[in-house]
Amino acid sequence: MRNFDEIYQLAVARKGEAGVLESLLHPKSQAEIAEMPDDRFLALMTKCIFQSGFNWKVVEAMWPGFEAAFKGFDIGRCAMLHDEDFGRLVSDVRIVRHGPKIRAVQENAVFLSDIAREHGSAGAFFAGWPTENYVGLLDLLQKRGSRLGGNTGQYFLRFSGIDSFILSQSVVNRLMAEGIVTKAPTSAKDKAAVQAAFNTWREQSGRSLTEISRILAVSID
DNA sequence: ATGGCTCTTTGCTTTAAACG
DNA sequence: CGTTTAAAGCAAAGAGCCAT
């Protein structure tokens, strides 16, 4: 496994110093995360879930319709959606009429309200999660959330501004090149190895998971 | 038996292009 | 002109395997 500086130099060689630096996404501060209202987390979860398996532009173009159909993603209202609401929503042309994904909105509203009750707010929970165990947060999203396993949960965290890595093909390719995994990390053991590698690079560079993830991605095809 | 994995299959909606 | 089809990229479920 290379030192992070070496990987950074590979990224620079491929993209040029300015390009690499400019393209870095910086996570939001913990204070900013903590202040985000619960309904924005539900909105972001929903957007990622509907974009999964779809041309993202479709959902993006329809997004105002989603906000309207789901009442601004108010946690309390979405948590109480019932059969008649689903009947209405699955034929609501303002949104993508995919039954299981529509149900996931209600289930994730319940999930987020549980989190908010446990930690004061969803933002407080996400802001307080330890970065050294990011994979634990992914597991929690998969276990307690609905349709938030796999890449969907990773994109949700990234788009929320939470410090995150995304196991894209390029990132996985770099992890394989470094001998950390031999295939896309799906097993618990592989995920722990990936977390350990990111933790090491974080110590070596002082950079966020988000920056490291982006740099890994541009360091290789 | 049990649980943890991996691999395979299935299904999901919209848009645009191809078709008859 | 209405209808069919391909494509997008993933989650979930099911099947099968191995080591406890």
Image: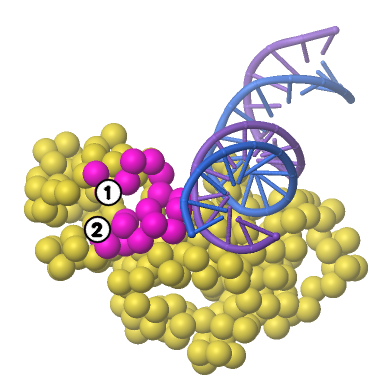
Chain colours: A yellow, B purple, C blue
Is A151 colored magenta in this rendering?
A: no
Quarter of the image where one finds residue B20: top right
Is A187 colored magenta in this rendering?
A: yes
Q: In the rendered view, would you say A75 is above or below A23?
A: below
Chain of the residue displaying label 1: A
Q: Earlier in the sequence, mark 1 or mark 2?
A: 1
Chain of the residue displaying label 2: A
Q: Position of residue A27 (x, y in %)?
A: 32, 68
Crowding around mark 1 (Cα neighbors within 10 Å: few <14, some 14 to 19, many 20+) is some
Crowding around mark 2 (Cα neighbors within 10 Å: few <14, some 14 to 19, many 20+) is some
Number of numbered discs on residues: 2
Q: Residue at x 15, y 68 (%)?
A: A203
- Is residue A64 visible in the rendered image? The answer is no
For the residues bearing labels 1 and 2, Cβ distance under 8 angstroms: yes
Q: SS at mark 2?
A: helix
| Extent of the magenta region | A179-198
Which amino acid, by three-letter code, is at mark 1?
Answer: Ile
Left or right: residue A65 compared with residue A85: left
Residue bearing the label numbered 1: A180
Residue bearing the label numbered 2: A197
